[in-house]
Every structure is written in C-alpha cells, then in structure tokens.
Amino acid sequence: MSRAARLDSAHITPSAHYTGYVWYRHHLADESFVTPFGRLAHAALAPVNWGARLAFGLDVERFLLQRHLLIDALLRQAIEQHGVRQVVEIACGLSPRGRRFCSRYPDLRYLEADLPHMAARKRLLLHEEGWLDARHQVRPVDILVEQGGNDLQALFSGLDREAPVLVITEGLVNYFALPVIESFWTRLAAQLRVFPSATYLTDLYPDLREHPRYRQLRWGIDIVGRLTRGRYYLHYAGEQAMVEGFGGCGFTEVRVHDPQELDAALRDAWPALVRVVEARIL
Ligand SMILES: C[S@@+](CC[C@H](N)C(=O)[O-])C[C@H]1O[C@@H](n2cnc3c(N)ncnc32)[C@H](O)[C@@H]1O
C-alpha cells in the first residue's frame, strides 16, 4: 500500500464525527452517537454550508441524507424481499444504521467495521448503551491491507457461508484514487464469491462534467480535501463507466441508483451528484 493511501486513511476518520452529527440532526440517530468534535465541526462549517446553499443551491446535508436514505431503502428491500440476514458495514464510523436495523429486525446479524481506533470507539459506544450482543458486533478492518489480522478475510471469517450476505460502505470510496479503491473492490468481490448470493452497496460521486453544478462541486471537493488533509476523487464519468468498472472488479450484476428514486422532498432541482451502486455476485 502506498504511503499516500495510508495517509488518506488516517485523515478521513475525523469526518465520521461530522457525518455522525448530521445523522443525529436529522433524527436518524440517538444523541449517544454525537461527539463534541462532531458538534463543533458542524458549527464551524455551518457558514460555508449556508453560503453554498444560498449561492449555488448546493446543500451538503442533503447530499448526506440522500445517500443515507437510499442505502437504507436498498438494505430494507434486501432484508424484506431477498432474505438477507447478515450485514457487514465497513467504514461504519459513527453511523447508527447497525443499531436502527438490529432493533427493527430481531433476527438480523450486523457486523460493523472500521480502522482499529474508530472500531474501538464505536464498540465502546454501543457497549455503554447496552446495544452490543452476539448478533451486533464491531471489528477492526483496514480496506487497504491485503494480508494480516485486519484484512477482509479475517473480517468475513465468522460469517455464515451458507446464507446471503450484504456489505455496505458509505462515505469511504471517493477518498481513494481509483486504482486503490478498485483493488479493494476486487478483493471484496473475491471474498463474496463463496456466499450463495452477495450484494455490495456503496455511495459514489461520479465525475459528471456536464452537470450544471460541476464547477461548484469541484470547489466543494477542494474544501473537503483540505479539511481532511487528503484528496477527494470523483470516479467514473457516468453510469456505463460505473457498470463496467464494477464488472471489471468481479461483480456480476451492477445497478446504479439515483437519489431521484427518493421522496420529492430530498430531490434537487437538477440531476443529483451522488449515486448508490448496488453490485451483486450471484
Ligand atoms: C466519512 S466517514 C463515514 C462514516 C459513516 N460510514 C457515515 O457515513 O457516517 C469515513 C470512515 O471511513 C473510515 N476509514 C478510513 N480509511 C479506512 C480504511 N482504510 N479501512 C476502513 N475504514 C476506513 C474512517 O475511519 C471513517 O470512519
């Protein structure tokens, strides 16, 4: 793994506190998921967000909600219509999804995973609230490592290989250059091949150059890059490129979801900037 990719990883973690606060603000998380840093970061960025909303109609919280709710809807569908009973959420950060879905679906097994220090923090949080048990657990993982205790093989080793599985990443993939993240997707697809069926859900910001807000989006990306002291990459030029890219990593069926599928309240006046990819291995 390159030094640049490793540094990217180390710098991404603080952003989980910000998104954790946004989940809470929109009534998707309990207050226990809020950290002082998340609250502070949200207050500090409020003027920038306000300016972007007013000047360009770009609303960062709406982007976050679009991806949270679209992934939630696809996860619900997988559980209720396709019999998924085991979920792995990689780069879980302070996401409350595991908690919400475990309380809604009593026979669901939910494994959350993140870099070791964030995983430890999340485990403590869930433990203190009395929410951890045999079916809801938190494990360390580093998507960049190809071998070792924190690799994908170790993460997946305790799962039931006779049952379908669903894996989620949210707010992760655009922090890495395409070859780095495609290497992760290829290793993930290899792990998933042993299950009778497997689904991978991820949000992804494509490089939509023709989008009416493309220039402003690039400015926003520069800001995110500076705040996380790394870079933020846009991957693939459109739906066809996404389908081919995930196909090249070993997924056999790829669908690209647009937040336009969500309720009107969450739609923008122009085409959405984020997509959710549903990549399956059948
Ligand atoms: C923007 S946060 C998203 C958190 C959560 N998924 C959400 O949407 O609220 C990105 C997360 O990716 C995790 N992360 C960064 N590099 C990683 C890596 N190499 N392997 C696993 N997780 C990583 C960070 O620790 C952080 O929790």
Image: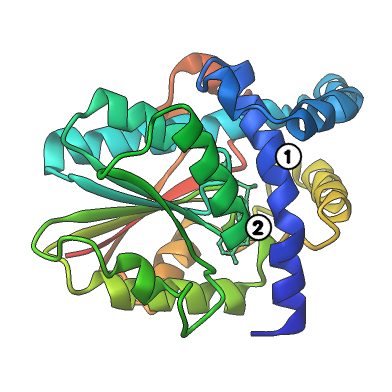
Where residue 170 sits in the image (x, y, percent)? 52, 48
Where residue 55 sits in the image (x, y, percent)? 88, 24
Q: Residue at x 41, y 69 (%)?
A: 246
Q: Is residue 99 above or below residue 1?
A: above
Q: Are marks 1 and 2 in contact (CB under 8 Å)?
A: no
Q: Quadrant of residue 82?
A: top left
In this view, the residue in front, 206 or 60, is: 60
Where residue 136 sits in the image (x, y, percent)? 32, 42
Classify residue 88 as left or right of residue 122.
Answer: left
Q: Quadrant of the N terminus?
A: bottom right
Q: Is residue 122 above or below residue 169?
A: above
Q: Residue at x 53, y 31 (%)?
A: 66
- Residue 204 in sight: no
Where residue 162 sits in the image (x, y, percent)? 8, 63
Identify the residue position indicated by label 1 in the image: 212
- Residue 196 in sight: yes
Task: Identify the mark at residue 111; answer none if there is no mark.
Answer: none
Identify the residue position indicated by label 2 in the image: 207
Q: Amino acid at mark 1?
A: Pro
Q: Earlier in the sequence, mark 1 or mark 2?
A: 2
Q: Quadrant of the C terminus?
A: bottom left
Q: Quadrant of residue 154?
A: bottom left
